[in-house]
Amino acid sequence: MTKEKNNREAFLYLKSLKESGVKEVLVERKNAPKPKPAALPARPVWSDAAALKAEPVSAETQAALKALREEALKCVRCQELSSTRQNVVFGSGNENCKLMFVGEAPGRDEDKQGLPFVGDAGKLLTQIIEAMGLKREQVYIANTLKCRPPKNRPPEPDEVANCRPFLEKQIELINPAMICALGKHASQALLKTDIPISKLRGEFRDYPGPTLGGIRIPVMCTYHPAYLLRNPAEKRTVWEDMKKIMKALA
Ligand code: SF4
């Protein structure tokens, strides 16, 4: 069959379709280049420093955090804590972090050094962060209370309420993609709930405080590293929670 004859037959066939009311015909072109499959988005490598690199925060945010820190250093809202503390432990780390850890309150070592999580529990937290493929300098660490409660007693509700504006402003300025609350007191204070930590942990929940532009910040609650020092079998549980954070951030 010649090419001419083929064309003629095709023409007659299309004409007959048109006459019978068909308005559109899909034609598959022979030898047409096949569309390329869409490229898969590059999956960030969790341990890649570029994924969570320390970028400088804006000068405005830096100034606001500095002013907030200075305000906290002079704070005497909690009469007992301000009269017994050695240092106010405002928080430390990458102010442009994606992941922020929030603990309960400074302990003896933290009070002495003015830095969060520097004692044995802090060392374990560093190990957890590194097991996640991160460096401690890539995250930000703060506490619900900025001053040490005497003898490491649990924070009183009025102390949590007094210190809450500092933490809320800190979170708003740092604007992390995710928060990990460490332990019962931090989790309950952060989420404004009295649900037990055993029920809070393991699932993302929404941070109920003010956020930059009203964006949603997921909170993963987990056990406190100090609790893990007493109950090493629960390390596995915490690791399950950390894996959820790693997956969500990656
Ligand atoms: S715990 Fe917070 S609110 Fe209380 S005195 Fe210290 S900085 Fe102020």
Image (cartoon, rainbow, N blue to C red):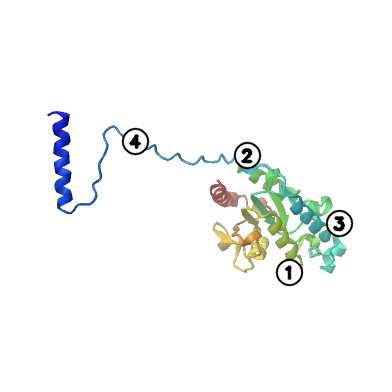
Label 2: which secondary element: helix
Residue linked to disc 2: 50
Counting residues from the start of the chain, the first of labels 3 and 4 encountered is 4
Q: Amino acid at mark 4?
A: Lys
Residue linked to disc 4: 34
Q: Amino acid at mark 2?
A: Ala
Establish if 142 lies above or below 31.
below
Q: Amino acid at mark 3?
A: Gln
Counting residues from the start of the chain, the first of labels 2 and 3 encountered is 2
- CA separation in Å, label 1 and label 2: 37 Å
- Circle 3 Cα neighbour tier, 10 Å, few/some/many (<14 / 14–19 / ≥20): some
Q: Position of residue 69 (x, y in %)?
A: 80, 56
Q: Amino acid at mark 1?
A: Ala
The quarter of the image holding the C terminus is top right
- CA separation in Å, label 1 and label 4: 63 Å
- CA separation in Å, label 2 and label 3: 37 Å
Residue linked to disc 3: 86
Establish if 134 lies above or below 88.
above
Q: Is residue 164 left or right of residue 200?
A: right
Image depth: mark 3 or mark 4 in front: 4
Establish if 111 lies above or below 209.
above
